[in-house]
Image: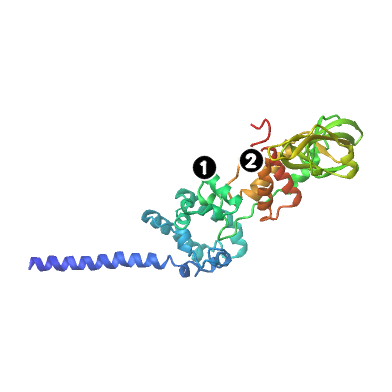
Amino acid sequence: MKKRYIALIAVIGIVIGWLTLGGTQAVLHATSSTEFCVSCHTMQKPLAEYQGSVHFSNQKGIRAECADCHIPKDPIDYLITKVRASKDIYHEFVTGKIDTDAKYEDHRLAMAETVWGQMRENDSATCRSCHDFDAMETYDQSVSAQKMHLYAQENNQTCIDCHKGVAHFAPQATLDTSAFDHLFDMAKNTKPDAVKVYPIEAIKMADLATINPTVELTTVAHKDNQRTVMVSGYQMQGAESVIYMGEGQRSIIATLTDAGIKALKLGDAKTDAYGNQWRSAELTGLIEAPVLASNQPLWDYAEELDNVYCATCHAKIPANHFTVNSWGPVAKSMGARTDISELNLEILTKFFQNHAKDVANHK
């Protein structure tokens, strides 16, 4: 009889265990489905963003469901994630924290940073379940993508450091619009006899040239609000209408008129390793536009542009990671993905180029 009781108790225990564990597993599995995830009213906005992303629809017909991106496969991380997700139910039915578009946008950055933090903690485990550096055919990637993936591997970056807006819109950082105007206020304090001055925007040098923002100019003479300044750089054979930042460094600092080309003071020509001929070039002329006595305020402004337009979507890339010539196309291609103005993009590009790894005396 005892054996029967023991067997009965064992069977009952197995049934209870099966119902408990199996039921729990069934609940966890059911609440991980995309259908369940987007069933709440507050998930309609992220659902629409997801449906417009490459993770929902692409040429290969491979779809990443909500759980594929948000729930790690590791058992412990899986359970932790499920427990954390319980707060979403609370806010959906109790607080109504994000039950309107306006509320959602107010909390978008905080919600995004929470997810980004979790993905950094587990080294973007869900991303790596599909994407892996070792499996990448880099030759099929764009040149910029190859460089960035190499940089990520060399600097132990994780996927989410750069791919913040792949399935949902990245939070929009706000640019202080008064910061640029403040540069002009600072320019009012520039002394007439300041030896080195820097334009805030593209300015005219009489009828000789257009000088780009942030370019260093040397004051030769001054009278009232007018300055006679000299711009120095290099000219390349075949591109006589521009002055470049340095020999072999294709960062344009001035665009010349026909009169400006004739007024240039040129040095002796040198041929570089690629067969291009370069020679030093100086141009002196009159300017009337406001200028700064230091380029530091411009670089501070550029840092703010970097935070708003670059670091919102990916980790900040040190300026000395690329060369002067590399930064031009990189900044242009990334700028095209944002609403940055042409002037702000030029200032930001000049910041990167003036701090690039091949700039003389860079520290």
Give whichever of 17, 55 is nearer the camera: 55
Measure how far apart labels 1 and 2 are at the Cα level: 16 Å
Label 2 CA crowd tier, 10 Å (few <14, some 14–19, many 20+):
some
Indicate which disc residue 319 carries.
Answer: 2
Indicate which disc residue 279 carries.
Answer: none
Residue drawn at 61 percent across, 55 percent down: 171
Q: Amino acid at mark 1?
A: Glu
Q: Quadrant of the C terminus?
A: top right
Res. 277 image quadrant: top right
Give whichever of 15, 262 is nearer the camera: 262
Q: x and y percent of residue 107 in the render?
A: 58, 57
Label 1 CA crowd tier, 10 Å (few <14, some 14–19, many 20+):
few
Give whichever of 221, 332 is nearer the camera: 332
Comparing marks 1 and 2, which lies closer to the viewer?
A: 1
Secondary structure of the residue carrying numbered label 1: helix
Q: Which residue in the structure is indicated by mark 1?
A: 154
Q: Quadrant of the N terminus?
A: bottom left
Residue drawn at 28 percent across, 68 percent down: 19
Q: Is residue 293 visible?
A: yes
Q: Is residue 288 visible?
A: no
Secondary structure of the residue carrying numbered label 2: helix
Q: x and y percent of residue 268 in the render?
A: 80, 32
Residue drawn at 82 percent across, 29 percent down: 195
Q: Is residue 309 above or below residue 8?
A: above
The colour mode here is: rainbow
